[in-house]
């Protein structure tokens, strides 16, 4: 039982900081279904999301920040198995930072490779756009697909 007013304020502040699954979905861009999936797959910092009255999931601001990181890792193409491993390491706490760093560096290299490939794609598209723009401006009937830049 709380006996001091500061304890009551801390308790009430903690309640105010907790978020329901719908609020977390809006803040992270994940669907409610995806949030449940992430929990089942062991991708969250805690093994189990806290439950409030009626068994409703309650998330902390730390959960939201972690989920935002997971969203970025996933959008970068990191496989769920690697995200799960990263979460496991994070849950273990200090002492495995080198392993976490290696996972992140590997993903960093993957993203850099993807960016290089996309830059090459963009260069080719820019060139083809220029060819099509010239053909449209000239009114020429040449096949733009075979036209040289």
Image (cartoon, rainbow, N blue to C red):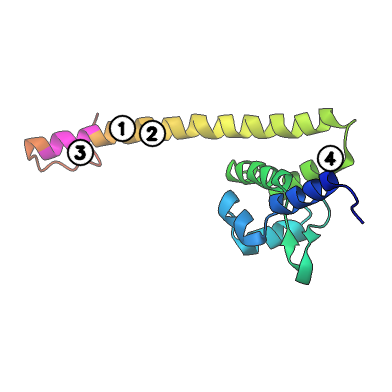
Task: Where is residue 15? Give x, y as percent.
Answer: 74, 54
Q: Please provide the residue range marked out in magenta.
A: 130-136
Nearer-the-camera pick, 119 or 83? 83
Question: Does residue 134 belong to the magenta stretch?
Answer: yes
Q: Is residue 111 magenta?
A: no
Q: Nearer the viewer, residue 103 or 26?
A: 26
Q: Which residue is mark 1?
A: 126
Q: Callout 3: few (<14), some (14-19), or many (20+) C-alpha neighbours within 10 Å?
A: some
Q: Is residue 60 left or right of residue 133?
A: right
Q: What's the CA distance linking mark 4 and mark 3? A: 52 Å
State the residue position of label 3. Answer: 132
State how far apart marks 4 and 2 are (Cα): 37 Å
Residue 48 versus residue 88 in the image, above or below:
below
Q: CB under 8 Å between callouts 2 and 1?
A: yes
Q: Is residue 102 above or below residue 71?
A: above
User: Percent x, y for residue 115?
Assistant: 51, 32
Residue at numbered disc 4: 89
C-alpha separation, residue under disc 1 versus residue under disc 3: 10 Å
Callout 3: SS: helix
Residue at horizontal 78 percent and vertical 68 percent from the top: 53
Residue 50 in picture, x, y percent from top left: 80, 58
Q: Which of disc 4 and disc 1 is earlier in sequence?
A: 4
Point out residue 127 in the picture as x, y percentages from the top left corner: 29, 31
């Amino acid at each position: 039982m709380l006996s001091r007013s500061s304890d009551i304020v801390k308790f009430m502040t903690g309640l105010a900081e907790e978020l329901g699954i719908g609020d977390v979905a809006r803040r992270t861009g994940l669907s409610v279904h995806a949030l449940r999936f992430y929990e089942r797959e062991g991708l969250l910092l805690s093994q189990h999301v806290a439950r409030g009255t009626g068994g409703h999931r309650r998330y902390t601001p730390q959960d939201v920040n972690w989920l935002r990181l997971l969203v970025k890792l996933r959008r970068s193409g990191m496989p769920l198995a690697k995200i799960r491993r990263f979460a496991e390491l994070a849950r273990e706490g200090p002492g495995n930072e080198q392993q976490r760093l290696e996972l992140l560096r590997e993903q960093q290299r993957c993203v850099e490779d993807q960016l290089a490939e996309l830059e090459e794609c963009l260069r080719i598209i820019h060139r083809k756009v220029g060819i099509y723009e010239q053909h449209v401006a000239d009114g020429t009937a040449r096949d733009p697909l075979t036209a040289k830049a």
